[in-house]
Image (tube, rainbow, N blue to C red):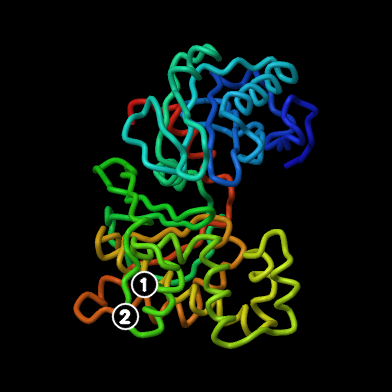
Amino acid sequence: MTWMKSNGAIDEMKTRIHQPDFDVGQFEGFVLGGDVGGTNTNIAVAGVREGKATLLYSAHFESRRLTSLAPAIREALDYGRVKYGIEVVRGVVGVAGPVTDPRKAKPTNLPWTVDAEEMRREFGFEEFRIENDFQIIGRGIESLKETDLFSAKGGDPAFGDGRAVIGAGTGLGKAILVYDGEKYRPVPSEGGHADFPIQDHFDLDLADFIRGGRDTPASYEDLLSGRGIEVIYDFLKGRRGRTDLTAEIEEAEDKAAAISKQRKTDPLCRETFAVYARCFGRCAKNFVLEAVATGGLYIAGGIAAKNREVFASTEFSTEFLNAEKQRHLLERTPVSVITNYDVSLYGACNAAVHPSD
């Protein structure tokens, strides 16, 4: 897999080659799949053969540098057209935010809207549609290999049991995977914005700190996203005091990443992730019970992939299994961390190959 920087209209577009020596003629056609997040926007082109998508190359952008989705798609298509002679016929993008209309959606943490009809007209797609980003991740799980998953907790699922996917990054996303007798179909959710359930005085103080005087309740996303890690750290800093690394963390451009980097050495960072793991375990438990997702919980997102051991920790597992009446359902539910960042691109391309699913 090769990384390159392309000199396109967008500064420092990064291009990744997934299949260095592929033959264009071996594919029946080509599709585009994208993932539009609050931090990064990723666009892939896949070759289609016998109903399956093979990722060929992908282009990666900082979302804050984009004024719309069109420039990113244009760069990705132009790259394939010039380098390989590829013409793409269909496209699907996953958007971080609620998608009530597959023709138009606004990403929650971006100032612009994705309009499917505009994309179809501008780039000549036969079809172009929008789905929720975690619905797309759900479609990508079927393409993952065993090596793309880290087992945080074993289980004993039955054939056809429901599944669920959850993940944190700029925000917190969820989707439910329902088996229809042939395959798992993803159902989108906005449960990341549900209220954080308070269990003790510590939780109450933390929630009050998060709210900062606002009238609305603290949500799961407030705690479990990247900014949630920063908030937990600041809350604990006010209680425990500063450490030798506090100044370095406060000056870091990506504060959450700096806290993550020091979580094994700095006591405040270590406690931050202990609280994070406990809160995530509670959220995961509630989601599994609500969806009866005993077939498996998949944890996606960069935070999980970079801190996978956190989800195998005592703090996570103790909270995950803390249920009076339905503990047996949680015990049989396997929990896996998705370590392959391309899962959303697989999912979007799979959706483009099978538009009727």
Up the image or down, 227 lies above or below 130; here it is below
The quarter of the displayed image where residue 309 is located: bottom right
Q: Nearer the viewer, residue 179 or 72?
A: 72
Position of 258 with respect to 192 (left or right) is right
- Residue 350 x %, y %: 46, 34
- Residue 184 x %, y %: 33, 45
Q: Which residue sits furthest bottom?
A: 240
Q: Residue at x 47, y 82 (%)?
A: 314
Tag 1 and tag 2, C-beta contact below 8 Å: yes
Q: Label 1: which residue?
A: 282
Up the image or down, 332 lies above or below 191; here it is below
Looking at the rendered image, the quarter that the C terminus falls into is top left
Q: Mark 1 vs mark 2: which is more N-terminal? A: 2
Q: Label 2: which residue?
A: 199
Position of 348 with respect to 175 (left or right) is right
Q: Is residue 47 visible?
A: yes
- Residue 232 x %, y %: 52, 73
> Which mark identifies residue 66?
none
